[in-house]
Amino acid sequence: MKKLRMIFSWLFLLLFFSACGLDTFYYLDPPISLTFIDEATSLSNDPSKQFVSFVTAASHADTTDIFQGTSVYYKIYNSPNQLLSNKNNIANINTEYTNQGMERLISWGYQPLTTDQVDTVNLVSAGGAQTVSIRLWNQTPAPNSPVNYEYPAEIRVNGQDKGIPVRSVDDKFFSFNSTVEASSPYSVPVEGQEDVTFTTGAGTSTWYVALYAVSTGMSPSLTPVYSQVVYLGSLAIGTTN
């Protein structure tokens, strides 16, 4: 009996000290996709539909201290098949309340989308739910105007203009022009750039941009925290000349 009590005492101590060393896990709710388009699957050729939108997650009492905002990550492909293959791979590991989807995006070189007015990783700061819409490139010049567009490149948060989307490469834009110099902000993507996945033989007349939204945070121990990533879709951008 004495030996049995000693065994239970050791088990209690083992469980106690094990519990003291347990990691604390933090969870963030993901954004919610509103307007979805996947032109890697089917081209629309309709400027009025060539955008994505989503609603950010709202702060909750149990995440207020760690929730920092919402980011959008992108990658440019010249092969729609490669984009779709990567999308399916990400979907297979993008389980709820884990960082696995975000870790895969980072490992494959996805970059944070910023604007010419917002240069932080988080496009939207934490707070109440906010609606975000993204048009990546200028489309359909307005009648009698060489500089205004019916569908301009822009990011809007709750209807307010937050600037023109820019790439991670030298603040280049997503309006691609094959006649400008490589140093121009409107130059076309090229193999080797950090935000490009290039497939030999796939062509370069049309580029496909995959977009993901994610809630971001920071734990008390300064460890990044991410929600499940949300696939916003893909947009096909033709090269002008």
Image (spheres, grey):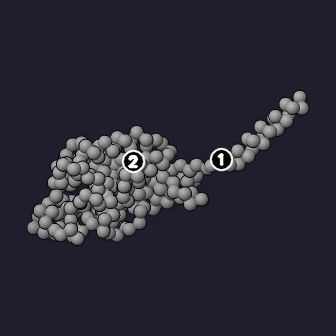
Q: Circle 1 sits on which residue?
A: 22
For this rendering, which residue is in front, 89 or 121?
Answer: 89
For this rendering, which residue is in front, 140 or 79?
Answer: 79
Q: Position of residue 234 (x, y in %)?
A: 28, 49
- The first of marks 2 and 1 along the sequence is 1
Per the model, the C-alpha gap separating discs 2 and 1 is 29 Å
Q: Amino acid at mark 2?
A: Val
Q: Is residue 58 visible?
A: no
Left/right placement of residue 69 relative to residue 163 reads: right
Q: Amino acid at mark 1?
A: Leu
Query: Disc 2, disc 1: CB below 8 Å?
Result: no
Badge 2 density bin: few <14, some 14–19, many ≥20, Cα 10 Å: many
Q: How many marks?
A: 2
Residue depicted at 31% across the width and 58% down the height: 195
Residue depicted at 46% across the width and 41% down the height: 95
Q: Position of residue 150 (x, y in %)?
A: 18, 61
Q: Position of residue 206 (x, y in %)?
A: 18, 53
Q: Is residue 122 visible?
A: yes
Left/right placement of residue 46 relative to residue 103 reads: left
Quarter of the view holding residue 19:
top right
Q: Secondary structure at mark 2?
A: strand
Q: Secondary structure at mark 1?
A: loop
Residue 95's label in the rendered image is: none
- Quadrant housing the C terminus: bottom left
Residue 230's label in the rendered image is: 2
